[in-house]
Image (spheres, grey):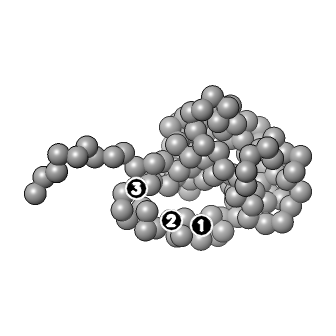
Amino acid sequence: MSSNQPVKKPIEILFSYAREDEKLRDELEKGLSVLKRQNRIVCWHDRQISGGDPWEQAISSHLDTADIILLLVSRAFIASDYSNRVEVRYALERHEKGEVRVIPVILRQCDWHDEPFAKLQA
């Protein structure tokens, strides 16, 4: 049977996180598995970059196309120069333009209240 309803494009979710928090990212992604099976969302993170691919270009491309960017906040995330210099800065620029929804997810207790994303509801 075919349906005349247009096929909805799944929402692309990008995980911005510190490598030290990879297991917690995996747990969060497992919690979204029902939505993934229903093709309502697709999740992306840097571990999906194939060997030999230019990683900065892949991250930049997904930062450009994501509908939702989850900032997985911890001490390690805050300490990461790359996360803050590139990912957070660009995510917030797109958020302020209304192009993406940026959501901080506090993974571990840390002092995040002075970070640029602190103005967003966590």
Q: Is residue 121 visible?
A: yes
Q: Quadrant of residue 90?
A: top right
Q: Do residues under tags 2 and 1 come within 8 Å of each other at their CB atoms?
A: yes
**Few, some or many residues within 10 Å of mark 3 (<14, 14–19, 20+):** some
Which sits earlier in the primary sequence, circle 2 or circle 3? 2
Q: Nearer the viewer, residue 94 or 63?
A: 94
Mark 1 belongs to which amino acid?
Leu
Element type at mark 3: loop
Q: Quadrant of residue 81?
A: top right
Q: CA distance from mark 2 to mark 3?
A: 10 Å
Q: CA distance from mark 3 to mark 1?
A: 16 Å
Image point (13%, 52%), residue name: 2
Which residue is tagged 3?
A: 40
Q: Which mark is residue 32?
A: 2
Q: Picture coordinates of residue 61 (x, y %)?
A: 53, 36
**Few, some or many residues within 10 Å of mark 1 (<14, 14–19, 20+):** some
Element type at mark 1: helix
Check the image and name the residue furthest to the left.
Answer: 1
Which residue is tagged 1?
A: 28
Element type at mark 2: loop
Q: Picture coordinates of residue 101 (x, y %)?
A: 60, 43
